[in-house]
Image (cartoon, rainbow, N blue to C red):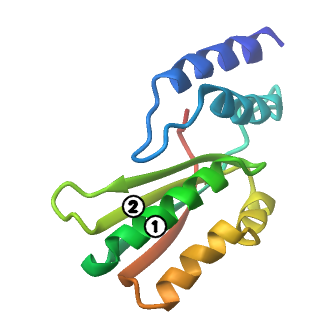
Amino acid sequence: PKYKMKLVTLLASLAAVTTSAFSPISTATQLQSFSRYAASASNSQLFAMPICIVVEAEIKEDRMDEFLDMIEKNAVGSRAEPGCIRFDVLQAEDQENKFFFYEVYEDAAAIAHHKEQPHYAAWGTFKESGGTISSVSKKASGKFMT
């Protein structure tokens, strides 16, 4: 319907001004994700709420270069996955070695697919090798999202 096209146009405009901590998310990539997301909306519900993952990770200072290389590849690979709406990597302003990952997926199947990817495995390998001081993940359901 008309409202979906207007919504997709609005989301495309918003995507054009969105930036990321490392690699910019292309407008086309965001528009494609938002379009798939909007197309699944029913008349009674604007969107089915996505699943969000928020990770807080403290990285060992002597492993920062390795981490930054790995997490950039992880973010770029994740953004290309079907069902990945967003994958942002944020660095704390008050602690140079603390990062937050903000991940948004269409559904549980998209998360399962993400966990099968080599770039996801690289994060696990990095943690297992002692690259992190701490890493905590929280799953949340989207409520009021754009």
Give percent across and percent down for residue 33.
71, 36
Instruction: Look at the numbered disc 1 and give the secondary structure of its residue.
Output: strand
Residue 35 in the figure: left or right of residue 100: right
Q: Quadrant of residue 20?
A: top left
Residue name at image x 31 percent, y 56 percent: 91
12 versus 120 height, above or below: above
Binning the other alpha carbons within 10 Å of mark 1 as few (below 14), some (14 to 19) or many (20 upward) gives: some
Q: Is residue 56 visible?
A: no
Give percent across and percent down for residue 22.
43, 47
100 versus 22 height, above or below: below
Residue name at image x 81 percent, y 61 percent: 109
Residue 55 - label:
1
Give percent across and percent down for residue 54.
48, 62
CB under 8 Å between discs 1 and 2: yes
The residue beneath circle 2 is 100
| Gap between marks 1 and 2 measured at Cα | 5 Å
Residue name at image x 32 percent, y 75 percent: 58
Q: Quadrant of residue 47?
A: top right
